[in-house]
Amino acid sequence: MALTIKSRADLIQDLVTAIKARDTAVETGYGPAKDLVVDPVSQVTRELYLQVKHVFDIEFLKNADLMDTAELDLLGESLGVKRKGPVSAVGSVFFYTSSQPLADILIPTGTPVASRAITGSVTSQSYVTSRTTTIFAASSDTFFNASVGLFEFEVPIRAVLTGASTNTAAGTIKTLMRQFSGISGVVNKSPTRGGRDIETNSDYARRISLALSGTARGTVGGLRRFGLEDERVIDAVVIQSGDPLLKRAEVTAGAIDVYILGEEPTVTQQMEKFTGLDIFFDNEPLVFPTPVSKVTAATGAMNFTERTHFFIDRDVILEGSAKARTIFRWNRSRSDLPDAGDTVTIEYTYDKLIQDLQVAMADPENSLLADVLFRSSEEEDISLTATVKASHDVIDLNAFKVAIQGTVTDFVNSRGLGVPIHESDLDLVIRSVPGVDFVFLPFAVLAKVGKRGSGTIPIEKNQFAQISDTSITINTSL
């Protein structure tokens, strides 16, 4: 049960009642009894109540996972901290066709697409486009992908439902729920991300603890709480002076970086007159590794491509923040660039969440002496190859492997910032899957993608671990 503290008026009434019980003739409304007993005792008692309440709440939160959600909600809301609701995953899909469009194609906002169910895994999920896109026949040749022989058009999407189940792997959204003349199919080349279930008691308790420790924006706890208040933020870490992760400490007085786990990828277009000079993006931070999805112009190459016609130079000091200055740099040695004065359209993706947090911190009521900069956290992709002995009652080995992949993915991708991946933890996670008889250790591979090794994977404070189905190999032994 949450502890209820009495107001000072209640305490005064209790003291008056106790005094009158001893002697009804004692005057408690004014005079010595009020000045020497009722007023000072009620004040001291009230302060003691508040101190006991603070300690009680902290101890109360230690058992958050075992608590009734209504009790925890009551405590959180009394401190102005509300539980975060479920969130929909976001991403993008490519509409494609093998034939060049002969007429303009309009794909309106709300166009439905869906993922295909995988045996032994999650059921299909529905998504809708979050922006109206027109595919102009006159410029469609710039969208030809020679490597696959298709004309491809990228459009942002958002899941219809909410929850972690709306996160899906690359290549799983392949169903057109509405047919378009000139479009033959759809596919997501990257995973959908950001989908989360309603905030757990432990995560909610963590934010309540920050509220108990203080709300001042100028404190580490206050800054972290400020970030975590946003529904889109999963985790936040504050980097201060003296930490090697603070890249701008030498040039910025009072610099404090707040790394954020969570993002809102937003696709936008920027139009520039071609001069051959470098271009700065209107919105930062860009979402790497491939922020620019397409570059078009009336003249020049059929398809402007990165590292051939242009380069993207990252801001190594302010990268991942709204103050970054990422440069779009033309390869001026090419002869097939746009004509001078031609309008160039650059479509790219930036993180609106980081931008929103920076704008909110700039509000006058959040005025600080420190120079606070919100930054995107860095993803560390890992791979796993494991051999598992299945029990004799396992009939469908493919579904068995998919179940293990899903369990491992859910575990790794739910870690917060700076949380290492231990072999022993993954061993327990895999053993929890029905049908697993034995896990062979050490794993053949447990390392960052592209690297060798097997064992604990260290994760920096500003990083988070991620793993995809394609990075998990499960070998079975009967």
Image (cartoon, rainbow, N blue to C red):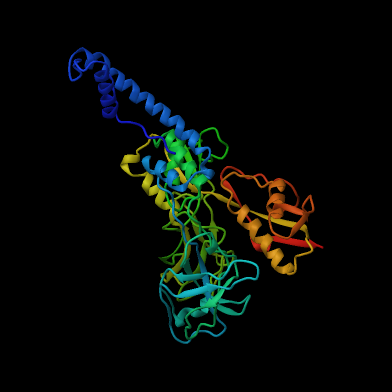
Is residue 69 or residue 108 the one in the foreground? 69
Left or right of 398: which side holds 99?
A: left
Residue visible at 55% across and 79% down?
185
- Percent of width and height locating residue 282: 41, 58
- Percent of width and height locating residue 275: 44, 65
427 to 251, vertically: above or below: below
Specify the quadrant of the image occupied by residue 364: top left
Residue visible at 65% across and 71% down?
119
Taking the image as drawn, is residue 399 in sight?
A: yes
- Percent of width and height locating residue 417: 56, 46
Residue visible at 51% across and 42% down?
64
Is residue 286 or residue 379 the one in the foreground? 379
296 to 315, vertically: above or below: below
Residue visible at 63% across and 75% down?
147
- Percent of width and height locating residue 357: 41, 49
Left or right of 295: which side holds 45?
A: left
Is residue 406 or residue 394 the one in the foreground? 394
Q: Which quadrant is the N terminus positioned in?
A: top left
Q: Which quadrant is the C terminus positioned in?
A: bottom right
Taking the image as drawn, is residue 152 in sight?
A: no
432 to 392, vertically: above or below: above
Q: How many marks?
A: 0
